[in-house]
Amino acid sequence: MSRLDVTEKIIATKVAKGIKWADVAAKVGLSKEWVTAACLGQMTLDKKQADTIGKIFGLSADEKKWLMVVPYKGSLPTSVPTDPLIYRFYELVSVYGTTFKELIHEEFGDGIMSAIDFKMDLKREPNAAGDRVNIVMSGKFLPYKTY
Amino acid sequence: MSRLDVTEKIIATKVAKGIKWADVAAKVGLSKEWVTAACLGQMTLDKKQADTIGKIFGLSADEKKWLMVVPYKGSLPTSVPTDPLIYRFYELVSVYGTTFKELIHEEFGDGIMSAIDFKMDLKREPNAAGDRVNIVMSGKFLPYKTY
Amino acid sequence: MSRLDVTEKIIATKVAKGIKWADVAAKVGLSKEWVTAACLGQMTLDKKQADTIGKIFGLSADEKKWLMVVPYKGSLPTSVPTDPLIYRFYELVSVYGTTFKELIHEEFGDGIMSAIDFKMDLKREPNAAGDRVNIVMSGKFLPYKTY
Amino acid sequence: MSRLDVTEKIIATKVAKGIKWADVAAKVGLSKEWVTAACLGQMTLDKKQADTIGKIFGLSADEKKWLMVVPYKGSLPTSVPTDPLIYRFYELVSVYGTTFKELIHEEFGDGIMSAIDFKMDLKREPNAAGDRVNIVMSGKFLPYKTY
Amino acid sequence: MSRLDVTEKIIATKVAKGIKWADVAAKVGLSKEWVTAACLGQMTLDKKQADTIGKIFGLSADEKKWLMVVPYKGSLPTSVPTDPLIYRFYELVSVYGTTFKELIHEEFGDGIMSAIDFKMDLKREPNAAGDRVNIVMSGKFLPYKTY
Amino acid sequence: MSRLDVTEKIIATKVAKGIKWADVAAKVGLSKEWVTAACLGQMTLDKKQADTIGKIFGLSADEKKWLMVVPYKGSLPTSVPTDPLIYRFYELVSVYGTTFKELIHEEFGDGIMSAIDFKMDLKREPNAAGDRVNIVMSGKFLPYKTY
Amino acid sequence: MSRLDVTEKIIATKVAKGIKWADVAAKVGLSKEWVTAACLGQMTLDKKQADTIGKIFGLSADEKKWLMVVPYKGSLPTSVPTDPLIYRFYELVSVYGTTFKELIHEEFGDGIMSAIDFKMDLKREPNAAGDRVNIVMSGKFLPYKTY
Amino acid sequence: MSRLDVTEKIIATKVAKGIKWADVAAKVGLSKEWVTAACLGQMTLDKKQADTIGKIFGLSADEKKWLMVVPYKGSLPTSVPTDPLIYRFYELVSVYGTTFKELIHEEFGDGIMSAIDFKMDLKREPNAAGDRVNIVMSGKFLPYKTY
Amino acid sequence: MSRLDVTEKIIATKVAKGIKWADVAAKVGLSKEWVTAACLGQMTLDKKQADTIGKIFGLSADEKKWLMVVPYKGSLPTSVPTDPLIYRFYELVSVYGTTFKELIHEEFGDGIMSAIDFKMDLKREPNAAGDRVNIVMSGKFLPYKTY
Amino acid sequence: MSRLDVTEKIIATKVAKGIKWADVAAKVGLSKEWVTAACLGQMTLDKKQADTIGKIFGLSADEKKWLMVVPYKGSLPTSVPTDPLIYRFYELVSVYGTTFKELIHEEFGDGIMSAIDFKMDLKREPNAAGDRVNIVMSGKFLPYKTY
């Protein structure tokens, strides 16, 4: 058994039972973004969170233990994603990558936006010309320092 | 001469004169995100915008014409970026890629968030534990349709 | 169980029973292009479509549920396809890629042809010198906008 | 001097003089698709065509000779294109590749659609919900034969 | 079951029974080149051919059906082959690729040698200094045409 | 100066003067296949051959010396060739690679067809249904031996 | 002019004048690790540091400005380094990568060792069996948090 | 059975039983760094070490034998690691690679730091601004010699 | 069943029974280099050799037949090997590749050292400063010839 | 100026003057293997060696300094070499890689053959059936140790 097996069981159960990520998140008491990432094998749960997830998806004791182990992260099968929805995010990095770099450095100096001390919120933005996906990302700025 | 030559001249002039992207954007009258991307060779300017940019960076008539030509987009030299700041965005796609996919499909059904009908706003988010980079992305949802 | 398992079952059943895609499409009441792509794991079906497909290919209730889940798209095992028929399409992108770009921009300005709001029709074009494959593609033009 | 130098001169002249591909094609007396591909270094011109192109773009005698040499084809700098417009065509091959294969084989048997005995026509398709890019491709079917 | 399963069964049976490709070809009544490629999953058989192959290798009715389905072609596990015998052919393409191109264009103009309307014959060429492999390839020339 | 510079000068001179490979070969007194490969930087010439080539293409004494140096071989810019004519040869290796392997081993046992002790002849094969490219390859069989 | 040009000038000057990194660092008043990385185009200098470096390497005013611009980081030409000294570090990541992961997670929980809030010290470790390279790395632990 | 099977069993048992690497190392009587690497399939154990490990993880006699076989090393599934913790080490090699090279050569001359005659110690470094990961690496310097 | 299955069985049996390659080679009556390569799936055995190997490793009649089939060669899972021992050989090719080329051409003219008509002998070379690995390679020189 | 420039000057001078590596080595007083590698930019020379090389190839004072700088090693333009002579060595690593590993471990235990404390001798081995290339490699065995 591995974390991947548990992830696949969670996904298969979700499809079979018609579970929604938003409902899972509500039961865990955290954001849908973090909870979904955790269920997809990208985050680590504590005992109480694992018990909640285990109950929802019918996991065994051993399967729940895997949820509490730090996973080997990276959710995509290829370095350039083939799925159109995910590719669009890759394209944003490709097209706007140097823009992110210029503007963050102009505002903060040398350093990065943390992808660890990071959170995000994804929601529907109603719009007469067609609703939009709205994503707010917030990551701590980490400066390079001299030493 | 090519668009790349013009981009390199803009960057070199920016360094030599100490120009700020925010000031360039203010003169163009558009967001700093779009204007920076345009100056970095990722967007297409109209005549008036090109004239403004041309004046700021001392471009020739021919160089300004290149700003009005649609560029071959993609700002990064490798498919997996080596620069730490840009890599963190790639890492977000890698770690959260399947999460983006699940949550957008759960909310909207099959389709994508457009990377074309898209805008974003990047700003400083003051925080006692260290200021944060705040990015708001807004892209039109485009549904797959049957036919 | 995963969407891939369902796709493989559909294909194996098609071979074993000698089913034709055109007939499947007729029963679903949509184009053969969309229906074939859906059966091959690239599109998402609604309940009624899934029931029709399920009946044709003898799918279980759980297998039909997978047809209604948005799949991870991308149908090819390598980034440059090895199959000669599919490679010819890749070659068209390689040889005519910059031509597509120049002509669409000349006609429409900066933007793309959507691969989401897209449909196509593939048919036999009789010709004395040897019949031809005729493909009509229609994709919405999506303009980049300033912001 | 190489064909690439001539291609770059043609493109630079086009930008400097504001030449349109459609006008070039009209002077050559062939489709805009073929003429643009030829100017971009993907097709071979005969003497008369090269003279016409040479006059439009101010090419020297030697430069015109390069237009009559069969070029090393392939117009893209990376095997997976980074430019969003061109990527969408790559995505169509990725998502619909197996569909192309199934439907052409169902209609014609084993073989391919030629990318050599091939022509296409790209035009604007007016549409109230936003104009569309319409592309008609026609390639001879070439059957595999036993021997 | 898939075509790959059938190919693997054919190969395993060939090893177990000590069958020779030349004998298989003689029974099918076609060249050893085409028949071997077909048995290795690269060509499509008709009913009669599949029956003959099925009898030789003890295939079931369903397995024979897979022989009549157009396979996803490409017989090698990596884009640069590691097997020394196959690599030598890759090396010929690498070393002589531009020579093939120059000489075919010099003789025929712009176009290609078809890999579809193609046949070949591989035989032993006796030679006092060590026998040689003799391969005769014949592919239809397909010219690019203007349009 | 490098061998590549000499190759480029030869090609540029060929285009400018309209020289034919067949004529070059006739003057060297060897096959057009070997002579073309040599001029394209893949083979090594002796003094007399270099003098002949030097005269035809107007090479300096130093440039002729480079023709007598063993070149770093491999004539293609990418491991999977993008040029359609050359790709077809790559495709033959991909589709028929395992067939080459099976048939040569069946006839000769374990070993390879040499790509060094190798020669080939490429010619037009008249055919009512369209002329064909005919290539005869002859490479010494080199057996693996036990030791 | 670009940062790369400045880096190359610094290196060429270092070779021509026989400058030592340790001496450069002493003049800048920081560690040799940080100062060397900065001179090699991986870190950003402030005005005073740039003036010191500029004096040592004879840089112009514009060249010094480039030292104060945040560079596009990543110092290696290939994703797997070919240089033996650098490869050994890559090998340590390859062999010990999962060990780093297990031990840091066992000690700290889910998170990473920062490569930004990071410093290191490289020195000679005398040893009778042959002196050793001793490297002390210190990076802040950054925990993933739930949200 | 293979070494990979044994590694996976060790990891699964560790998760199921909540074993800590530090405790395993204490029982083996060696550093946690070496012991963890060995359990993860990167080092070779002697009989006594294998017996200790076998007892802790409930391995069979055959499984213990695999621990004494030199493994095929390299612990990561991709050449550029996707896991954020491990990527940071890759990033250090990318950003500081040329710095390692310059400073080791300045101190020792041409040669490398051995990745074989190597040891390391990873520990928590308490810090008021957030604890740090402290890694001390020690590798023998191996000089290139003339011959 | 495939050759890979037989190779894996041989390796597993070797580990389980503690067999040494040198002893296997002695029983086969050939060098340990050739015999090990053959057991690892890189060479082809004759009937008598396969019987000897079969007896040592307890192979079935069918498994022995696979040893007599020419294998698809190439023993490594990645094009740049990750295992440190094997990587050192790759590094020798990388560092000394052009040196091999220059010196062999200086001595023999244009051609190659055969990797087919090749043998080698690997042994311990006692040395007070630490024993050394001594490898003698002998490959027939194969000259390129004009034709 | 860079080490690459010096290497290219050495090679161009060698071709122009017809210098032999063996003669260069004799003047330096070291093996032709080491001296050739050094001239090709893979090894570091001391003052006296650089003076000798500088005299032979007419190098300036600055160029000689570059010979005394440790180069960024790796002499090949692609990770899988295209040149047939060099490829054969790559093929030996590919085919015999696991054999090297098994036999060195069987003789020495876990560790590697050093590619740093390494020397080799390449010479002609006369043979009635065609002369052979004989290469003797000697590298120190470096054992992995527990810690």
Image: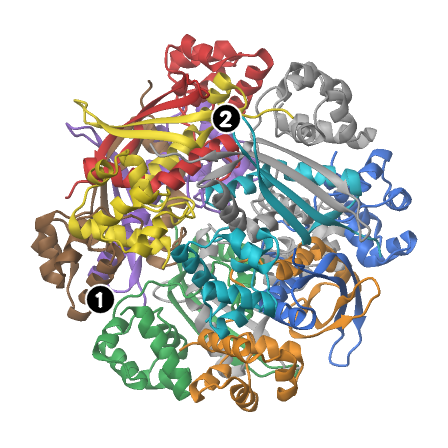
Chain colours: A purple, B brown, C red, D yellow, F cyan, G green, I blue, J orange
Q: In percent of the image, x 44 and y 46: which residue is there?
A: A79
Residue I24 vs residue D141, the one in the foreground: D141
Q: Position of residue G55 (x, y in %)?
A: 28, 85
What chain is tagged by disc 2?
D
Q: Where is residue G79 in the image (x, y as percent from the top left)?
A: 47, 58
Residue A122 vs residue G27, the one in the foreground: G27
**Amino acid marked by disc 1:** Ala
Quadrant of the drawing holding the C terminus of chain D: top right
Confirm whether residue A77 shows in the render. no
**Amino acid marked by disc 2:** Leu
Q: In this view, does B44 lie above or below J78?
A: above
For label 1, the SS is helix
For the residues labelled 2 and 1, say whether their Cβ atoms are less than 8 Å apart. Answer: no
Q: How crowded is mark 1: few (under 14 residues within 10 Å), some or many (20 or more)?
A: some
Q: Where is residue D71 in the image (x, y as percent from the top left)?
A: 41, 47
Confirm whether residue B78 shows in the render. yes
Residue linked to disc 2: D142
Residue G93 vs residue C113, the one in the foreground: C113
Q: Say which quarter of the image contains residue I111.
A: bottom right
Q: How crowded is mark 2: few (under 14 residues within 10 Å), some or many (20 or more)?
A: many
Q: Position of residue C23 (x, y in %)?
A: 46, 10
Quadrant of the drawing holding the N terminus of chain D: bottom left
Q: In percent of the image, x 37 and y 74: which residue is there?
A: G34
Q: Say which quarter of the image contains residue A74.
A: top left
What chain is tagged by disc 1?
B
Q: Is residue B2 above or below residue G125?
A: above
Q: Is residue B50 above or below residue C147?
A: below
Residue C129 vs residue B135, the one in the foreground: C129
The numbered disc on residue B12 is: 1
